[in-house]
Image (tube, rainbow, N blue to C red):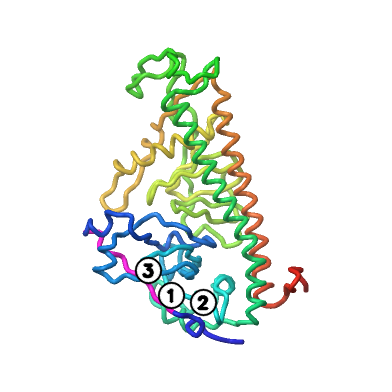
């Protein structure tokens, strides 16, 4: 049965960005507030920013309930058109088109996958100089609705893969927290396990003053600058270098990772965005990078994970001192002078961090394969080329 998105919706609309100049709108954690760059994952359970109840009262910004579908109508590059399902009460900015589905007519999860599958067709309806979507275009977008039981069955099979990806992402968040906690104990507080398996500093381990850090560090340890223990360069490509079905990772200054057809690097590397939000990533394998992305390749693989965490910790400090009046940026000198405490005797501690980061990368690789499988099955299921029966078998 053919319908439009508006016909199967209880409500469709966009959000509002409360004035950034009014601190009272942003000084509490009352209401989760979503930006377009967070859209793209299957389910969104939380946000990076919150607004106050006063902001809601003054602006009449709408609160969207769980199971709302949110589409990024415009934004930077690939952000446009990304789709997610909101899993808690949230407000959004004006670039999000939010849709509450009438569950008597359609399964919200099925509608999500329909929009995901038909995104290119939707994007072709964009208007304006920047080819933005708008709420009216999305309202009139057609959707085919089979029987509700078929909708739920199709959504069930596709969401199984997305939930596995989601679960792997959650595990990775916890693994990264663990790695950073250990780094803090071992290489910031210097309470790493000593020869008697006791915390070194707290147990009276010998310390001495270091002129670089301007604080005490364990005797026989040294402080190395990144310039001395890594090769540091930038990517050479512009943002148009990415391709939709590329074989290799393409790292830009954005949070997401794109694809490309030609690699330029093939090592364990730390990727530091030279502008934007100055995010830090790590990757092992062949890849390429944007011209404002710093590529940091350790000379000794032992320090790979510790250097990633050291760079992550340094980013907040670099943000405060970033240069540029309009577009902030980090210089090569800033990156070269990031420091890492090292010890030949305790090299095994660095390797323990490598084990954790390696597990994170394995789960990310698994997610890449699951995503390929999901994206392969998505059009086949949505177009009826394969079908699922009541026993959950997939048939041609």
Mark in the foreground, 2 or 3: 3
Examine the image and state in which quarter residue 19 appears.
bottom left
For the residue pair 243 and 349, the one nearer the viewer reads as: 349
Bin the neighbour count of mark 2 within 10 Å (Cα to Cα): few under 14, some 14-19, many 20 and up.
Answer: some
Residue at x-position 67% and y-position 77%:
150
Residue at x-position 50% and y-position 49%:
289
Establish if 35 lies above or below 385.
above
Q: Is residue 109 left or right of residue 133?
A: right
Give SS at disc 1. loop
**Residue 163 numbered tag:** none
Q: Earlier in the sequence, mark 2 or mark 3?
A: 3
Percent of width and height locating residue 260: 57, 56
Establish if 229 lies above or below 207.
below
Percent of width and height locating residue 259: 56, 56
Percent of width and height locating residue 199: 48, 21
Number of marks drawn: 3
Give SS at disc 3. loop
Residue at x-position 23% and y-position 57%:
24
Bin the neighbour count of mark 3 within 10 Å (Cα to Cα): few under 14, some 14-19, many 20 and up.
Answer: some
In contact (CB < 8 Å): disc 1 and disc 2: yes
Establish if 120 lies above or below 371.
below
Mark in the foreground, 3 or 1: 3
Q: Which residue is mark 1?
A: 133
Examine the image and state in which quarter residue 97 appears.
bottom left
**Residue 63 numbered tag:** 3
For the residue pair 394 and 368, the one nearer the viewer reads as: 394
For the residue pair 126 and 240, the one nearer the viewer reads as: 126
Quadrant location, the C terminus: bottom right
SS assignment for the magenta stretch, majority:
loop
Give SS at disc 2. helix
Q: Which residues are magenta?
A: 11-21
């Amino acid at each position: 049965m053919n319908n439009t998105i508006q016909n199967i919706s209880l409500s469709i609309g966009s959000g509002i960005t409360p004035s950034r100049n009014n601190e009272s709108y942003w000084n509490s954690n009352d209401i989760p507030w979503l930006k377009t760059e967070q859209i793209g994952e299957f389910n969104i359970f939380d946000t990076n920013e919150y607004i106050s109840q006063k902001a809601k009262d003054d602006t009449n910004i709408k609160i969207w309930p769980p199971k709302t579908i949110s589409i990024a109508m415009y934004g930077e590059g690939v952000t446009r058109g990304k789709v997610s399902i909101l899993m808690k009460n949230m407000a959004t900015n004006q670039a999000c088109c939010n849709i509450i589905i009438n569950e008597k007519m359609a399964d919200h999860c099925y509608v999500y996958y329909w929009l995901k599958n038909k995104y290119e067709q939707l994007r072709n309806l964009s208007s304006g100089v920047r080819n933005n979507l708008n709420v009216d275009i999305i309202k009139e977008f057609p959707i085919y609705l089979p029987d509700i039981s078929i909708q739920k069955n199709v959504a069930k099979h596709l969401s199984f893969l997305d939930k596995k990806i989601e679960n792997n992402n959650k595990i990775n968040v916890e693994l990264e927290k663990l790695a950073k906690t250990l780094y803090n104990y071992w290489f910031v507080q210097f309470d790493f396990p000593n020869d008697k398996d006791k915390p070194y500093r707290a147990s009276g381990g010998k310390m001495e003053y270091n002129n670089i850090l301007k604080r005490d560090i364990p005797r026989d340890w040294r402080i190395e600058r990144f310039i001395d223990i890594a090769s540091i360069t930038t990517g050479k490509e512009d943002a148009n270098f990415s391709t939709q079905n590329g074989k290799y990772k393409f790292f830009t200054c954005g949070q997401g990772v794109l694809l490309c057809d030609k690699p330029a690097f093939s090592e364990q590397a730390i990727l530091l965005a030279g502008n934007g939000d100055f995010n830090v990533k790590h990757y092992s394998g062949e890849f390429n990078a944007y011209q404002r992305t710093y590529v940091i390749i350790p000379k000794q693989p032992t320090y790979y994970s510790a250097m990633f965490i050291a760079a992550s910790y340094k980013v907040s400090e670099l943000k405060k001192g970033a240069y540029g009046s309009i577009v902030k940026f980090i210089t090569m000198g800033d990156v070269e002078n990031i420091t890492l405490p090292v010890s030949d005797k305790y090299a095994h501690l660095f390797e323990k961090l490598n084990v954790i980061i390696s597990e994170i990368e394995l789960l990310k690789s698994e997610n890449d394969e699951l995503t390929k499988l999901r994206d392969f099955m998505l059009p086949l299921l949505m177009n009826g080329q394969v079908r699922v029966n009541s026993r959950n078998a997939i048939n041609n």
